[in-house]
Every structure is written in structure tokens, then in C-alpha cells.
Image: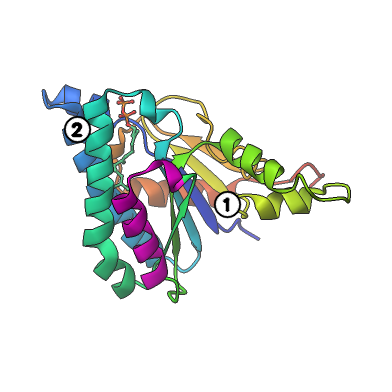
Amino acid sequence: MMNQANHIAIIMDGNGRWAKLQDKKRVKGHEAGAKVVKEITKYCSNNKEIQRLTLYAFSTENWKRPRLEVEFLMKLLEKYLKDELPSYLENNVKFEAIGDIRAFSKSLQKTIKNVEEKTAHCDGLIQSLALNYGSQDEILRAVNSLKECDENITLEMINNALDCKRDVDLLIRTGGDKRLSNFLLWQSAYAELFFIDTLWPDFTCKNLEKIIQKFKKVERRFGGLK
Ligand code: FPP
């Protein structure tokens, strides 16, 4: 049986470098990156094998960036979510945020909640955006939420207390670096990792298609024998 890419997770890296290569400001790279998010989401929503697409949009560490870049990303996210609501509905995509969104402006939080509510009935692809997300922060919040519990904590209890409760099958990072940058560490325990040099704004559905084809042929053993 070939592998099924049920849950794909992507670290969308390289926006800044893409912009620099064309003598543009870094934020132009993020703008171009947002367009790719739309295309990849549409592609995944049309592929019945893919149930879940989780994208790293803003990490708990991204606050360290220059204030103007952070503000730009916040505005871009809010605009993206407002503009995309009709496409989510049209493509039967359910939107979910993972991460601690309490750190965002009231207005952005409201937009996130609104798109989550309006798409809650959609039963096609689930698009999860990781927003103010860090895997260690997610695990810490999960463990703290179990603090009052009298029984011994089980793996299942931790898993169910996480923002993202599904294992990743295929994790992709664009932009050439080979690291996980605090993204879905728990959920990627047995994920197949693919690193591609292409910068996120240049990433295409064709690139994704090729990666999925390779992934399908990998032998996954989950720690067991063949
Ligand atoms: C990494 O590129 C990308 C980010 C930190 C943010 C990801 C954001 C987007 C793809 C666009 C907005 C997303 C949505 C959902 C609207 P980088 O800036 O670290 O690039 P660099 O490594 O070349 O500097």
C-alpha cells in the first residue's frame, strides 16, 4: 500500500530572501507568500487524499522581528482571512487557528474566530494556520491544562490537550534550511521530512505534487520492521 498524505505540514520559509533577490522590501515577499498560500490551499482542497494542511504563518519567535514587519504580517493575515472567507466556503475548507492567539489584537482575534465559526460546517480540507505558534509553548500549555488531574498522565491525554491533535504524515520546509524551528515537534514524531531549496513565493502546486509522489513511495515503518 502506498503512503497517504493525510496531513501535510509546511514551514513556509524564504519570503525575505525572495524579495531581496528582486530588490524589493521584505514585506513584498510576505505578500507574494500569501498568494502561494491561496494556491496551495486550493490544490489541497481538490485532492481527496489530503485531509489536513497545517501552515506555519507566525511563530512565537517571530515577535523578535522589526516592529514594522510584525505589524505588516498582522495586517496581511487579517486581510487574507477576510478576503479568503468566500473561497474557504466555495472550496468546502474548514479553517482553524493553532497557537496562542490571545497575544494578537482584538480585531485580528475576532476575524480569526469569525472565519473559524463561518467555516465550522465545512467537511473538506482542514486548513490550520499556526499563529503565534511554538511547539514547546503548545506542549507547555497542554501539560499545564492537565495539572489538576489526579491520574497518571498518558500520551493520549497530552495529545488531546494539544492545539493540533493529529500526527503529521509529510512535513515540508521551503527555503533550503534543514530545521524544524519549533513547529509540530510532537506531531512529527514519525513524519517524513522534505526540505526543498525553492523559496516559498516560488513554490508551486507542481513542486508539492512531486514531493507527494516521492512521499508515497517511502517505506514508513513507525519504528517496527518491514
Ligand atoms: C518566512 O519567511 C515566513 C514567515 C515568517 C511568515 C510566513 C508568512 C507568509 C507565507 C505570508 C502570510 C501568510 C498568510 C497565511 C497570509 P522569512 O521572512 O523568514 O524569509 P527569509 O528566511 O528569507 O528571511
- Drawn side of residue 68 relative to residue 97, left or right: left
Residue found 74% across the figure and 48% down from its top: 146
Amino acid type, mark 2: Val
Residue found 69% across the figure and 42% down from its top: 144
Mark 2 surroundings: few (<14), some (14-19) or many (≥20) residues within 10 A: some
Q: How many labels does the image show?
A: 2
Measured in 3D between alpha carbons, the distance from the residue under mark 1 to the one under mark 2, in whole angstroms, is 28 Å
- Position of residue 70 relative to residue 203, above or below, is above
Residue found 82% across the figure and 49% down from its top: 154
- Residue under pointer 2: 27
Residue found 67% across the figure and 40% down from its top: 189
Residue 222 x, y percent position in the rendering: 74, 45
Secondary structure, magenta segment, majority class = helix
Q: Give the range drawn in magenta.
A: 101-118
The answer to whether residue 185 is magenta is: no
Residue 150 x, y percent position in the rendering: 87, 50
Q: How is the image coloured?
A: rainbow
Can you name the residue that lies furthest to the right here?
Answer: 151
Q: Quadrant of residue 16?
A: top left
Let me know if residue 202 appears in the view.
no
- Drawn side of residue 75 relative to residue 9, left or right: left
Amino acid type, mark 1: Cys
- Residue under pointer 1: 164
* Ligand 1: quadrant of the figure: top left
The answer to whether residue 104 is magenta is: yes
Residue 188 x, y percent position in the rendering: 61, 42
